[in-house]
Amino acid sequence: MKQDRFLVGILVGIGVLVVVALALFFTRQDKQEYVSEDTPEGIVHNYALALYREEYEKAYEYLAEMEHKPTYNEFRQAFFNHFVDPSNVGLELGETEIAGEEAYVTVYLIYNPSDPFSSSYRNTETARLERQNGEWKLLQMPYNFWSYDWYQPKPELIK
């Protein structure tokens, strides 16, 4: 009889711990929101957030209007085909340097290990923006958020 009560006590304790862990997990999740778009770091933040949320139309609006800009379909297809994949990297913003109509935002890419014996690491990269019609627009972002062939002339086929 005493062993049954002890076993029930242990099971109830485990159940309470599981409920508390689940409650903490769902209530403490980081809820990222869009920020003001009047600064270069705000544009970088919003662009990355739109990609994480798979809101490709919103992300596309942050690209600069320049020659050889990818079409919206080319932009979106790069993510669908996983040529560009921000899902496996975290992003942290650093300092911003504004030089006239151009801005440079330091971006830290945080990579998590794929095995239990490695530790995470981070790379320091730079996002480049330009002011166009009073708004900051992206000219370049680090890999995982940007395709190498955007804004590059398309090769001509030789016949």
Image: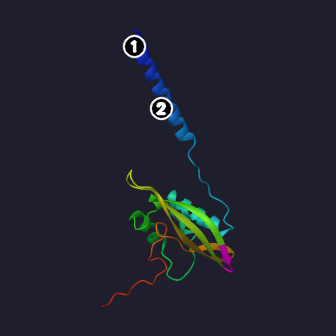
Per the rendering, the mark at residue 4 is 1
Q: Secondary structure at mark 1?
A: helix
Location of residue 26 with respect to 45 vertically, above or below: above
Query: Residue shown at 38%/87% (left/top)?
Result: 156
Query: Residue shown at 46%/19% (left/top)?
Result: 9
Judged left or right of residue 42, residue 81 is left
How many numbered marks does the figure carry?
Answer: 2
> Percent x, y for residue 6?
43, 16
Q: Secondary structure at mark 2?
A: helix
Secondary structure predominantly adopted by residues drawn in magenta: strand
| Quarter of the image where one finds residue 5 | top left
Q: Quadrant of the C terminus?
A: bottom left
Q: Earlier in the sequence, mark 2 or mark 1?
A: 1
The residue lying toward the viewer, choosing from 45 and 137, is 45
Per the rendering, the mark at residue 21 is none
Q: Which region of the structure is painted magenta? A: 97-101
Q: Quadrant of the N terminus?
A: top left
Q: CA distance from mark 2 to mark 1?
A: 21 Å
Residue marked by disc 2: 18
- Other-residue count near label 1 (Cα within 10 Å), few / some / many at <14 / 14–19 / ≥20: few
Q: How is the image coloured?
A: rainbow
The kind of residue on which mark 1 rests is: Asp
> Percent x, y for residue 150?
47, 76
The kind of residue on which mark 2 rests is: Val
Foreground tag (2 vs 1) = 1
